[in-house]
Image (cartoon, coloured by chain):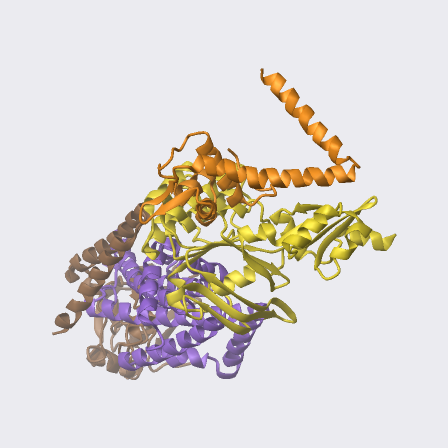
Chain colours: A yellow, B orange, C brown, D purple
Amino acid sequence: MNVIECSGLTKVYGSRKAVNDLSFTIAENKITGLIGRNGAGKTTLLKIIAGYYRKSAGKITVFSKNPFNNIQVAEKLIFVDDRMSFPPALALSEILSSAAAFYPHWNKRIADGLLNYFQLEPKEKHQYLSKGMASTFNMIIGLASRCPLTIYDEPTTGMDAAVRKDFYRALLKDYIEQPRTIILSSHLLNEIEDLLEDVLLLRGGSKELQLPIAELKHYAVGLSGREEAFAEFINDVDILHQKQMGNVKYIVVRNNFSESLQKRIGMSGVEMTPVATDDVCVYLTAGNKGGIDDVFHRSE
Amino acid sequence: MKLNPDGMKPIYVQIAEWLEAEILAGNIQSDEKMYSQYQLAEMFTINPATAGKGLNLLADEDILYKKRGLGMFVVSDAKERILEKRKSQVLKTMVMELVAEAERLDVSEGELLEMIKTIQKQKREESQ
Amino acid sequence: MVSLFFLPIVALIIFAIVFLTKKITSKGFRYFFLGYTAVLCLAVAVHYAIPEKNFNSDLKRLTYSESEVDLNAMDEFYDALYEGRIADVEGVYVKSQWSLEVEENLLQVVSRDSEGIPSTIVAERKETNDGVIEVTHYTTKRVVEGFDFTEQIQPYEMELADGVLKILPPEEYRMRIVAFQTDFEISQFQEGDGRELFDDMDFPSYGFGEEVIYMKIPQHLQVETAPGVYLDILGEEE
Amino acid sequence: MSFIEVNEWKAAKKQFFYKLTAYKGFFISLFIAQFVALVFSYGGGMHTSISVDLVSLTVSFYSGDMLFGFTLIWAFIVAAKLTSENYRNNDFSFVSTRISSNLSNIALIATLSFVGSVTSLMAGVLLRVIVYFTTDIGMIYGKNYLLSPPELLTGIYAAFLYLALVCAAGYLIGAVVQMHKVLIVLVPAVLFGLVSYELTKFGTIRWVEYFTSEGSLLMFTLKVISAVLIFFAGALVLSNRLEVRR
């Protein structure tokens, strides 16, 4: 069963399309990573899913319903980001007990345990927390609510490395205990890669690709060698990235070489190397094929 | 073992290899129950689906077998199969790379075989 | 009947306060809330425990029908005065009377230094020269904003010596009262009452009351007045 | 109302109880405002002196007007505040739709109006009791001093309606202002203009007098209820279009 289905989804702000003709589905009980650069439309998309924003065009259903202003969708999801706001009069412990009233699957044991583990003072007020502490607290709410659809928008903002690590582990353990659909947005893939089952990559408000994380490893391949040596192989392939290092050229291309072709490449003296998923994402979402180097080449 | 997320091998392959190592080292005996995908997910902080993929990889190679409702178990001749597989696959690719490199360096077939023999001899002497 | 209607409302209010207090999860705030409402409830209880008779009955205000006689007396006062029949008017009272003997032929009427006499002084010549001045202080009811001060006002003092009559007005009677205005959200639904405390009566809103010091003097007595003291002798208008 | 789902009522109910504690500051500010009004009313009672012939009468007036006035101002501010971005965002941290958010706000406003009306009238009684114990009883003019229970309850009822009216107006104005930044300046300017126009042309504000000059409790109730319904419906329609949590 698909929790989220959308087709041709578009969100326009003035003349800018924050989300542009986006079509994808997210299946139940999977952890999906929503990856994209800043301004790729991640937050806009997530807020449309959460029912906060109204779509401009296209179709979107969450739990088979249009999410905008829909109580039946709102009941089943929680949206966690660093701008979650709470009444200033409430202490952290009061916020947690309030949240418990809203979510039928609320897990008090986890909420209290994590609050204690991360040394958050129950009597503290949310607005006095540091950025990282606030993110940690919001994450606790996201975990303990155990909503069928849990959305984390850049959840680790401000957290230090140790807390981030704990967060990912807590997220995973809780997911194993109670599988549910989780969307985790980030501009960086490498940290969350292991947690994910699927990746949805956005670029300029459009879908660049959606793949199981394992396939993303095979998605691209790096070739290095003298340019003339591999010229014959790259006539009809997508070049994602290229870089000149002396006489040797390094290019990253989509990996749709057949087995025999791979062997021939190997024999031709061109070195074939896998490309890290993180790099794949960077190349796919880059403005142009040459990366930052292009800017400097042109000015020469 | 520590997973290497920046590494070139997919995580599920790394998981499969780690499980093979566990079997080879005798940490998990024949016909014993293999870790579940959730145990693996927790051990390595990875998505259970990824862990499952690692297990399935071994099942596809008949190193593990499924018992309905009970999980994955190690086949009785798992060690042999692993060794056989590594011979046929791992060693073969290594040799292929070796041959390609030798060609690049203009090393003749005879020279290459000679080098291999020398190294084998050295190793034998060292271990004695 | 009325109380039957209001009883459920009172019950509702009490229920609501109890309900709200229960729903408040913050302990400190709950005590604060309870404390404030408790003080207010106590105030209401105390308020209704105050017996009505505790309030000064002197502060009762006259109604129109009660003062009809007095208002008529006011209307007739000066006519009757100059016609010499002031004593016969209903609603005119004798506040005090003096009988003074004068030996001199000239009477000087004075007050305190640089002070006038607030009331009118009228004199009537008698038929005889008996050397006796009969002074009567006539007054109607003195009512200010509906309160009757007739009794509270002290009498004048008269001193006669060496042909000088000193008329000393009493000290001003001072009164302070504390009054409540009904809240507008209540008075809006009442018959034009309670809001403008003293605008509710038919009589002159300010106050009323007339008085005169009426003297009967020997026939040939000459009278002089100090500045600020005005004295009319009947039949001798200037 | 069929366009509101059962679940929306449930969510609104949860939000209402949440807000009751979360926005305790509203209650505290009410009590502080009433306390200040009480001090002012007691200390600054109006005095008028009349001096006629041999009598000087000084009357010190006390009334609960300031208490109720402060409560009205408080109600307006609180209602307008509820529509602000921060307060709306607070709702959407947990399960909420615009309708449930508005419904719970309306329930909160009704509760605040209720508490405001009961306490402001009762504080008026407290003022009377304080005056009773601090003044020579011979000086107290009894006529309006004792507030009969029917009077008190009428006052509470009318005060509740007034507060609900002011809250609804504040809520609508707040919702309008939220639509665009320009309106934050524009709306108060227009309101101020309207008030001064009415005052110069008619010497009174007709739309205020429409309510204050109504002598029948029943008609007053009907007038207020219809106005409140219109205001809330307007606010609901406006906020239903808003996107939250930018």
Image position, residue C68 (x, y; %): 22, 81
Is residue D96 left or right of D216 when viewed as pictured? right
Camera-side residue of C94 and D190? D190
Q: Split into 4 quadrants, where in the image is the C terminus of chain B? A: top right
Residue at left 42%, top 46%?
A: A140
Instruction: Residue lying at the far front in this picture: please name it.
Output: B110
Residue at 43%, 69% in the rendered image: A69
User: Residue furthest toward the top?
Assistant: B128
Q: Position of residue D34 (x, y in %)?
A: 36, 57
**Quadrant of the rendered structure where residue C46 is?**
bottom left
Residue B70: give x, y in percent of width and height: 32, 45
Relative to C86, say whether C13 is above or below. above
Q: In this view, does A191 lie above or below C72?
A: above
In the drawing, does residue D171 fall left or right of residue A190?
left
Q: Mark yes or no: residue A122 visible.
A: no
Residue at the image position 75 percent from the left and 45 percent from the top: A269
Q: Is residue B37 visible?
A: yes
At 63% across and 55% down in the image, what residue appears?
A: A37
Q: Which of A247 and D118 is in front in this view?
A: A247
Q: In which quarter of the image is residue C216?
A: bottom left
User: What is the x, y in percent for residue A74?
Assistant: 40, 63
